[in-house]
Amino acid sequence: MADLNQTKAIKHLWKSGRKVTALPRKAVAKTQFPLRSAPVPHGIETAPSTIGVNYETEWARRPGARVARRVFLNIVWKPMIGFYAQPEIRNADRLKALGKSGAIFAANHHSHTDTAVMMTALPKPWRNRLFIAGAADYFFTTRPTSALSALFFGAVPISRTGVSRRSIAEPIKLLKRDWSMVIYPEGGRSKDGWSQDFKAGAAFLSKQSGSPVVPVHLDGTGSVLPKGQNWPTRARVSVNFGSPLHMKPDESSQRFTERIEAAVALLADENATDWWHARLRKAEKNTPRLQGPEVSPWRRKWATTSRRRVHTPSLKRQRWPFV
C-alpha cells in the first residue's frame, strides 16, 4: 500500500513539473511579436499575396529589363549551354511559316537546362520577344526568386494545380501583342527520362489568343542535368523544331493537345532515325510514344540509358569558356 501511494506521489510530481516547464514555453511563444508577424484577428480581411500567381511581371517587359536579360543571355547562358550541351538546331526553317508573328513553343521537359537551351536556340525574331511559362509553386514562392525568374528568364507565373484567371490573363495579353512563349505541356520535369502526358495548357492559350503552337523536341538535356542532379554534365543536345500547328474551329482543347503531343513524338522519332522512316511509322500509326515502353521501371531505365548512349556521343575536349 505504501508503494502504491509513493507511485501516485511520483506521478503527481512529474505532471506538476511538466506544467511548470510548459509555462516558460508559453510565455516565450507569446512574446515573439518582434520576430514573427502579429496574429490577425478573426473577421479581418488580409491583403492578397504578392507572390505565386499574383506576382506582377509587367516590369520584366520594360526596355531596361529586356536589355539586362539580353546581356545575361549572351554573357552567361550562351557560353554555359555551348560548353555543356553544344545544341544542334534542326529544322529552324520550318519557323518561316510564322512570318513575324509570335507563337507558343511547346516542348518536352527533362531538365532545368531546357529553358536556357530554348532561349539560346530560338532565332532572333522570336528570342527577342520571349517569355517563359514558370510554375508559380516552384519559381515564384518568394519575392527574390520571383524577381530573378522574371528578370533573367522573362518568366510569367502559371498555376499547375488548377485554372487561375490571374495566371492565364498575362500570357494571353502578351501573346496577343505578338510575344512568343515557351511552355512545357507536361507540367513538370521527367522523373525517369521519359515524358509525361501532355496537359491542355498550351492548347487553351492558343485558343484564347489565336497564336499557333510550334512543337519542339529537346533531346539530351536529361543527360546534362537530370532531375535530382545538382551539377551539369557535358552531353550532346539537339533541338528539333516542328511546323506550326493551328487549332481548328471545331476542335476541342483536348484533341488539339493530343495533336501537339503526337507532333512532338514525331520529332523525337526524327531524332532517333530520320525524316523518311519517321513518316513511314506515322503513316502506319506506329510512332513510338513519348512516355516510353509500358514495362517494369528497371526496363524503362535501361531503355532510356541505352537510347542516350546512342544519341549522346562523346564531345571533344574544349577549354571553358572558349567554345
Image (cartoon, grey):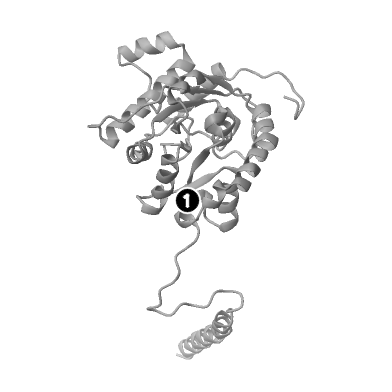
Q: Quadrant of the N terminus?
A: bottom left
| Number of residue marks | 1
Q: Residue at x 73, y 21 (%)?
A: 317
Asked whether the viewer can see residue 298, the reply is yes
> Residue 212, relative to residue 29: is it above or below?
above
Q: Secondary structure at mark 1?
A: helix
Residue in front for this viewpoint, 68 or 282: 68
Q: Left or right of 173: which side holds 58?
A: right
- What residue is shown with label 1? 136
In the figure, residue 230 lies in which quadrant? top right
The one of 15 and 105 positioned closer to us in this rendering? 105
Q: Nearer the viewer, residue 106 or 224?
A: 106
Residue at (38%, 20%) from the top-left corner? 288
Residue 143, position as x, y percentages in the image: 57, 58
Q: Position of residue 95 (x, y in %)?
A: 47, 23
Which residue is situated farthest in the left direction here?
A: 250
Image height of 25 relative to 130, above or below = below
Which quarter of the rendering shows the C terminus? Answer: top right
- Whether residue 222 appears in this view of the structure is no
Q: Position of residue 220 (x, y in %)?
A: 55, 25
Image-based side of 163 in relation to 119, left or right: left
Q: Is residue 41 above or below residue 292?
A: below
Name the amino acid type tagged 1. Ala
Can you tell which quarter of the image residue 233 is in?
Answer: top right
Residue at the location (60% across, 24% down)? Answer: 87
Residue 20 higher or lower than 37, as above or below: below
Residue drawn where x is 66% and y is 27% of the image: 82
Percent x, y for residue 224?
60, 30
| Along the line of sight, the residue nearer the viewer: 309 or 167 | 167
